[in-house]
Image (cartoon, rainbow, N blue to C red):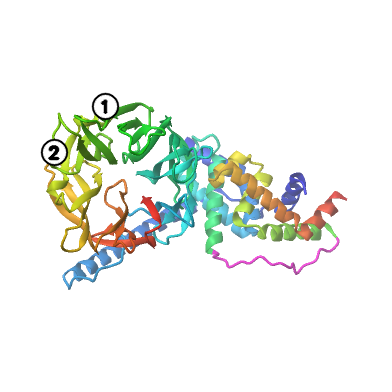
Amino acid sequence: MSTGQLRDLLEAAAGEPPHRVTVAAVRRRAARRRMLEYVSAAAAAVLLAGAGIAVAARATGPAPASSPRIPAGVPRYYVQQAFRAAPPPTTVVRSRATGAVTATVRCPWGSAQPATGEIAPASHQTFFMICQTVTRKGAGSVVTGSRIYRFRLTGSGKIGGYSLVPGGTLARLSAGNLAAAADGTELAVTTLPAGTAPNSPAAASIIVISTRTGARAVWHGTPAVPGKMSFSTGDLSLTADGHELVYLATPRCIRGGCKPTGNGEEVRALSPAAQGGQLSSSRLVARQSALVPLSSGYLDGAIVSPNGSSVQVLVMNSPGQGPTTVSVVKVSAATGRPLRVLYRVTTGNGFSFQFFSSDPSGRYLILDTGPTSGTTNGWIDHGRLVTLTPAAGGNVFYETW
Amino acid sequence: MDAEAEEFAQFVEVRERALQRSAWLLTGDWALAEDLVQTALARSWPRWGRIRRRDDPEIYVRRVMVNTWSTWARRRWWGERASATVPDRPVPGDVATDLAIRIAVRTALASLTSRQRAVLVLRVFDDLSEAQVAQVLNCATGTVKSTMARALAKLREDPRLAELMEREAR
């Protein structure tokens, strides 16, 4: 069947319309539609007013029981890296409401794989991810190159296509700790020379990349050598405009010429992030000793708020006597003092922890932690954990949204 | 009458027949086709100032038409169901042949999914390019190609349509 034959057949079948469609008829219908719209709007207003009165009347009564209603603005999809059966973990997109997998995330670069835990969200369901090539799989694998890609989710949770970020080719570098400004204009990533051994004294640097121009600024770390204060870098996060870069640091002083701070772990800030310089010039925002005793606890995550006024810190505390607690604490960026505990869970004797992440608004935090027998995967909603799929988070490596 | 209104009137005058014929292929019913075209034009009219500045206003109107039809098809207002068997048989004479073609085409089109039908009508009957069809349906050109291929494959399986083709060829 050729399309020519088919066209002839369609032509013959369609024939001639029995009536004409006139401009007058169209205008009449347009006017009727307009009137219907006005009537519908008026009816909706009346209904809303009625509902408002009903709500106001109910508000004076007893407080309602806790409602499972999901607040508006909670992301509809999350990106998850988890083991299915065996390593490496697969990266998928899941629906928050149903847990269904809506897409699989792949690296559009040869045999490269998404680096575990290195996916950073930005607004409008946009994500950045690090793709890495390795010499061999499993233990002893060596990263030979990294690239940063951007992808966006469609309204139905599918991947709307990948694009290489300008300036995102990190040749001969091993990259980790990716963070994105909420507006997606700036990225920060920790880098080491490719093939660096885990215990090497080589210092990690933080590269800040403008995703518009590909311009880079480098914050140089100091190698962990005697006499020099060095800062390990982890858990990068950027303010919404990308002006301030916050990271979780462990200051180290190896003999002479420097003094241990006594702060324990520190949350430090660099600004303007796009300027570059030395990591040692960063500003202290919060210290472990103000949140949890150095002897019994530590910090396991820090995320700066979009406006930079506070930092949400994950605090572990395993006192000698009493159960272990895991807390998400909001800390003032100005004073370093705790403002509010957003979530706390008691895990008994010891704890397990997988990851802690946030959406670009900083309002919806995902946490996977729990007792040593198994973790729970969920997001924090007004002090409670609403589970995500799978609820048992032992095989989940990382999630973000 | 201002220029905008005059241009719209001209557009309706010149294109309503073609739009109605496409609408018939989508709906399979002249009354619904007329209704669909009127609705699409009524929806386009308030935005005509913007639409007329486009390269091809008809693409926009067709898009409104196909979208409106999709909504109707989803709602199934008229509860119409495609029938696998046609009660009438063609009898000798032109009128009967025309009717047979119309019924066979309508039944064959009804066997397609909404999107397949829309792609087929826009691409084959309205002779739009793949890119234009993609624009109307708000999808990728590749989707248009694959949908078209599937629609044609399905139509090839229709024995009544094949018989008509054979008769036409003779």
Packing grade of label 2 (10 A; few <14, some 14-19, many >=20) is: few
Q: Chain of mark 2?
A: A
The amino acid type found where label 1 is placed reads Gln
Q: Secondary structure at mark 1?
A: helix
From this view, report whether residue A58 is shown above or below residue A354.
Answer: below
| Residue in the image at 17% along x and 35% along y | A283
Q: Position of residue A18 (x, y in %)?
A: 66, 55
Packing grade of label 1 (10 A; few <14, some 14-19, many >=20) is: few
| Front residue of A13 and A110 | A110
Q: Main secondary structure of the magenta part?
A: loop
Q: Position of residue B84 (x, y in %)?
A: 71, 67
Residue farthest toward the bottom in the current orientation of the protein:
A62
Q: In the drawing, does residue B40 fall left or right of residue A334? A: right
| Residue in the image at 17% along x and 58% along y | A319
The amino acid type found where label 2 is placed reads Thr
What is the magenta range?
A: B76-92
Q: Which mark is residue A275?
A: 1
Mark toward the start of the polypeptide (1 vs 2)? 2
Q: Which mark is residue A68?
A: none
- Report which quarter residue A210 is drawn in: top left
Q: In the drawing, does residue A236 fall left or right of residue B87? A: left
Q: Secondary structure at mark 2?
A: loop
| Residue in the image at 68% along x and 52% along y | B151
Q: In the drawing, does residue B73 fall left or right of residue A121? A: right
Query: Circle 2 sits on which residue?
Result: A261
Look at the image and say whether residue A81 sits in the magenta stretch: no
| Front residue of B116 and B60 | B116
| Residue in the image at 47% along x and 51% along y | A87
Q: Position of residue A329 (x, y in %)?
A: 19, 52
Count of labels in the image = 2
